[in-house]
Image (tube, grey):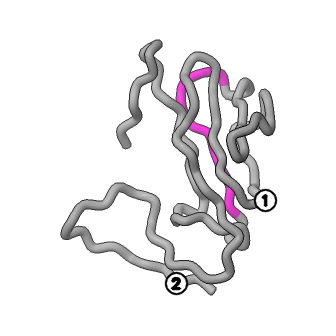
Amino acid sequence: GWCPLSPAGAQTPQVLLEPPWTPAVLWDRVTLTCRGSGARGATTWYKDGKRWWQKGHESFVVTKSGTYKCERPGTGLSPPVQVLNDWLGLQVPVQELLEGDTVTLSCRV
């Protein structure tokens, strides 16, 4: 997919979800992965707007609901990803959709 450019010309990092459904829910055992340029070991994670895990791993399994972002040196912050603690949800695949596309929906209980 397309990644916006930061002022330095490096790709802005993106948070990838596994399983790739949105909205993400805790009971799906969601793994977040920070992808983009910059040193992998220097990934900084933010939860609910606050620095949460500095120089942490590129991936981890989410154990608390919240809004997550990642950052790599010189590339800026990723767009936010929200992980909910809901018991019922209508989910769609994480992908860009255009009018007229066929999409699989998932009603999760």
Q: Which of 53 and 59 is in front in this view?
A: 53
Q: Is residue 84 left or right of residue 7?
A: right
Query: Label 2: which residue?
Result: 107
- Classed neighbour count for the residue bearing mark 2: other residues with Cα under 10 Å, few (<14), some (14–19), many (≥20): few
The magenta segment is: 30-39
SS at mark 1 in the image:
loop
Q: Where 12 falls versus 91 (above or below)?
A: above
Residue type, mark 2 in image = Cys
Q: Outermost residue, bottom direction?
A: 109
Pair 2/1: label in front:
1
Left or right: residue 22 versus residue 24 is left
Badge 1 is on which residue?
64
Residue furthest left as drawn: 100
Please tell me which residue is depicted at 40% across the width and 25% down the height of the picture.
Answer: 5
* Kind of element beneath mark 2: strand
Give the image location of residue 88, x and y in percent. 61, 83
Q: What residue type is labelled 1?
A: Lys
